[in-house]
Amino acid sequence: MMNKPQEDFHIGTGTTVEALNHRDEQDIWMLREIADRLAADCRAIVEKVVQELRASQPEYDPVEDEELDRSVTRNVNMAVRTLAKGTALPAEDLNEGLLTGRERYEKHIAVQDVLQGFRTCFTIIHNHFVMYCEAIGVDTRTALRGSRILWAVADGFTARIVAAYRDLATESAIRDAELRTEGVRRILRGEPSIGIYQRLGLDPSHRYAAVCCSFPSGRGSTVRSRLETSGSYSGAPAQVVFEGELVVGLVSKRPEPQKDQIIGIGPFVSLSEVAGSYQVARKLLTIAQAKQLGGIYSAAEASWRLALLESPGVSAHLIDKCIAAVVEYGDFGQEIIDSVEMYFEDSCVVKIAAQRLMVHENSLRYRLRRYEEITGLRLSNPADIAEIQWALEARTLYNDNDCR
């Protein structure tokens, strides 16, 4: 028991600094007396709180008795420290809240249930505080001061619990995202695993297509989310992740394209064959980007153009044969190339191609004739047409010389 300071005195309207200091000294002495009693009764308080939690909160069933005992003891000791100091402890010093939050989070107890459990605990602690105040005759002013600092600490403690849950949830989300990303990448690399399928919720009996998608700056998350949503069947969810400046992954159905979005999609295959589908999807995206296309680009749309990326040597040879000599004519040579390209795009119909080029039909015929004269190829010969079209597509894809 502590020695009581000088006897009480009445503080009137002319309160001095000395009087205020004396009153504060009295309050602290009383609060320390209560802190001593609280510490002495710690075991009984802990048992009472544990009993109440077991009876009223089944959500705490996963928490073992020893762990619950420890956390309640920490709470009692926190109240003892607070009263002994005579002022509320700052929230950043209440590591008990972080520890309790982590323990309950690991037991998958909802944060609202944890806060309810703490309120139950601290209410019992506060009831003992009130009981001690009455027992030793603490005046209303001192009792109110002690009550306020206890509840201020309780507020700080609950804030620490909430912060712990928030931080742990963020850590868990990041960890899950990393595992998910690595799992998708492994499947796309050709490293199938039943464990990965199960973790990602993929159905091995379902067929999936790999996708490779570009996206406008700042819209990556939106594109990824929509691609995943529109590319999922019930029970066979799509899994799409970031890969550098692309979004890549697996879809169980053909997704819906969004504005300003280019998607290369490989064939639908079994999960063990998705790596091959992914290689096709990357090539298709490359072709679609070179041609400045939009929407979904599959092997059906690309047709023979897929072979361009497999045969750079052939592409280089045909560019030399079908285009190089014409390009040497400068701007006029470029007009000839553009005219031949438009001629093919319009199914070799001069009238339509001339209208789109905004030139007279005779001007277009002249350009086509000059092309034949320069290259020695014939625009009416199927074999020459095949080589010219290959060269034109390769030139776009490889930027004229990158395939050499």
Image (cartoon, rainbow, N blue to C red):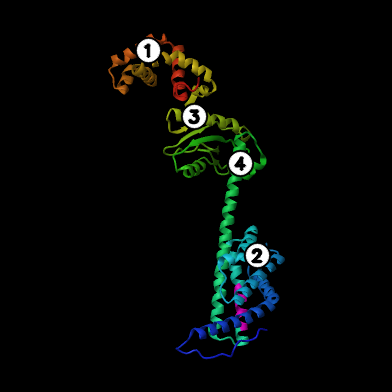
Label 2 – label 1 distance at C-alpha:
84 Å
The type of residue carrying mark 2 is Tyr
Label 3 – label 2 distance at C-alpha:
55 Å
- Magenta span main SS: helix
The type of residue carrying mark 1 is Tyr
The residue carrying mark 4 is 182
Q: Quadrant of residue 182?
A: top right
| Nearest-to-viewer mark from 2 and 1 | 1
Label 2 – label 4 distance at C-alpha:
35 Å
Numbered-mark total: 4
Q: Closer to the N terminus: mark 1 or mark 4?
A: 4
| 203 vs 169: above or below | above
Give residue 198's position: percent from left, percent from top: 64, 44
Label 3 – label 4 distance at C-alpha:
23 Å
Packing grade of label 2 (10 A; few <14, some 14-19, many >=20) is many
Boundaries of the magenta span: 122-132
Q: Closer to the N terminus: mark 3 or mark 1?
A: 3
Element marked by disc 2: helix
| Residue 60 disc label | 2
| Residue 286 disc label | 3
The residue carrying mark 1 is 371
The type of residue carrying mark 3 is Thr
Residue at 43% x, 15% y: name it.
324
| 217 vs 398: above or below | below
Q: Is residue 386 visible?
A: no
